[in-house]
Amino acid sequence: MKKIISILLALVLTLSLVACSNNTKETEAEKPTETKTEGNTGTEGGSATGSINVYTRDASSGTRGAFEELIDFEGKLTDKAAETSGNGDMATKVGQDANAIGYVSLTTDFQANKIKALQYEGVEATEENVLNGSYALKRPFSYVTRAADDYADENVKKLVDAFMVFMTESTEGLEAVASAGGIVDVKAGKPWEELKANHPVVDQDNSALSIRTGGSTSVEKALKAAIEAFQPLAGNVQFVTAHTGSSDGYKRVLGDEKDGANAADIGFASREFKTEEDVAKGMHTGVFAQDAVVVAVAESNPLTNLTKQQIFDIFTGAVNTWEEVK
């Protein structure tokens, strides 16, 4: 009898131990997996890995000039950087390279190019943040026209005058620029119907006349929007746009190319005009919008933010892999 009782007790003890073991396994399986993120790199679900492929603009680019000045690395760009021919080319190449980093205008179509805008010092690149001063990577969209006495056709001169007023002062012009990403104060505008009284040339048929523009590629999107809004209000005047970089904006309007095959009536720069670019001679000169320079990576890159020092280190070659970005 005692032997039977001992066997039963052993069986009960064994079953209890098995049950406890199963409960322990179930509890461990239910524990959530911890996800580690890098504290200073600003990443979503991890860090980028591998070599950093730096892309830059050509030497004539106003975007490049503004970017290098703002980050303070003029003349120190890594010799491994690949040059791109324009804002669109930069966006395309960065979007096609998972390890790429570059910089573009805020007017860029980020989604279409499969690129992501990074925050700068923890601040998102938005129009509101540019206007309130919290986003520091910003630059002007500048313009200058030919001198008042340097137009072969008087009506073209009058139309250039009208267009500059339309783009910079009219509600319709400011709205057009804003619709294409240019950062402007639309509320400061006046109705074109009121302003055009000083520009009767717009009320005639101007379809046989052309205004030539050149300079920065970054301004093209905002400029095109203003042109399309202006044309039906100005006798369908034509525009010939040939943009190759900010340094050509002054040259083709007031500089040594103003009378050549590439001459223009309005020149644009996505930066302030330099001291040696004497824009005071132009019939009109000024800033028609503000823009943000945005550091961009491929949309697959988990990075979300970079500091000024991190950007400096990457673009000067002090840091060459994503793992080093701290």
Image (cartoon, helix red, strand yellow):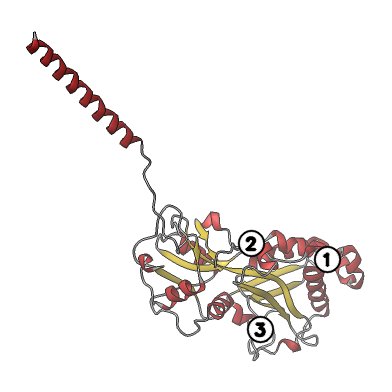
Q: Quadrant of the N terminus?
A: top left
In front of the other: 117 or 199: 117
Q: Secondary structure at mark 1?
A: loop
Q: CA distance from mark 1 to mark 3?
A: 25 Å
Q: Say which amino acid is labelled 2.
A: Thr
Whether pointer 2 and pointer 3 mark residues with C-beta atoms closer than 8 Å, the reply is no
Tell me the SS state at disc 3.
loop
Mark 3 lies on residue: 273
In x, y percent, where is residue 117? Answer: 54, 61
- Residue behind mark 2: 126
Q: Looking at the picture, how far across and down is residue 174, in whole percent?
A: 77, 64
The front one of 223 and 314 is 314
Which quadrant of the figure contains the C terminus? bottom left
Q: Amino acid at mark 1?
A: Gly
SS under mark 2: loop
| Residue shown at 63% from the left, 78% from the top | 271
Question: In which quarter of the view is residue 110 placed?
Answer: bottom right
Direction from residue 184 to residue 216 in the image, left or right: left
> Badge 1, how many Cα within 10 Å: few under 14, some, many 20+?
some
